[in-house]
Image: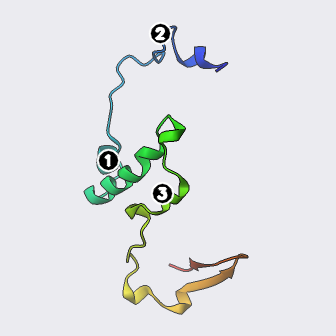
Amino acid sequence: GAKSKDFFDRHGDLKRIRRLKYWPLNKLLIERYKFSESDANEFSEFLTPLLDFAPEKRPTAQQCLKHPWLAEKDSIPNDMRTESSVEKVDVGISNLKIKVGK
């Protein structure tokens, strides 16, 4: 694009970056953001195809919704599941549950 000369040299290499190290997303999530290994791997497997440069290789929204990472997990402890901690909000075609409080 119009600003490509600001970021790339005439050979297509990044300017001002001499030694760019590749760091896999799952390793970054584990080491830098303290994800568990399984969570990092699941999230990485979900996100990496979405970042593909070629649009025809990217999954559709429908395909993304079927990914195991988006599957509902039992992450709320039983002692926190009370109707008083959940407020129902009417938003047109669906009802969302929003956790309120602590």
Q: Residue furthest top?
A: 10
Q: Residues within 10 Å of mark 2 (few under 14, many from 20)?
A: few
Mark 1: secondary structure: helix
Q: Name which of mark 1 and mark 2 comes first in the sequence.
A: 2
Residue at the image point whose x is 36% and y is 24% from the top: 20
- Amino acid bearing label 3: Cys
Q: Position of residue 78 (x, y in %)?
A: 38, 87
Of badges 1 and 3, nearer the viewer stands 3
- Amino acid bearing label 1: Asn
Mark 3: secondary structure: helix
Nearest to the observer: residue 76 or residue 63: 63
Q: Which residue is mark 2?
A: 11
Mark 2: secondary structure: loop
Nearest to the observer: residue 47 or residue 29: 47
Nearest to the observer: residue 4 or residue 61: 61
Q: Gap in Å between the C-alphas at discs 1 and 2?
A: 30 Å
Residue at the image point whose x is 61% and y is 84% from the top: 87
Q: Position of residue 93 (x, y in %)?
A: 70, 76
> Which disc number belongs to residue 64?
3
Whether 62 is drawn above or below 4: the answer is below
Q: Residues within 10 Å of mark 1 (few under 14, many from 20)?
A: many
Q: Which residue is mark 1?
A: 26
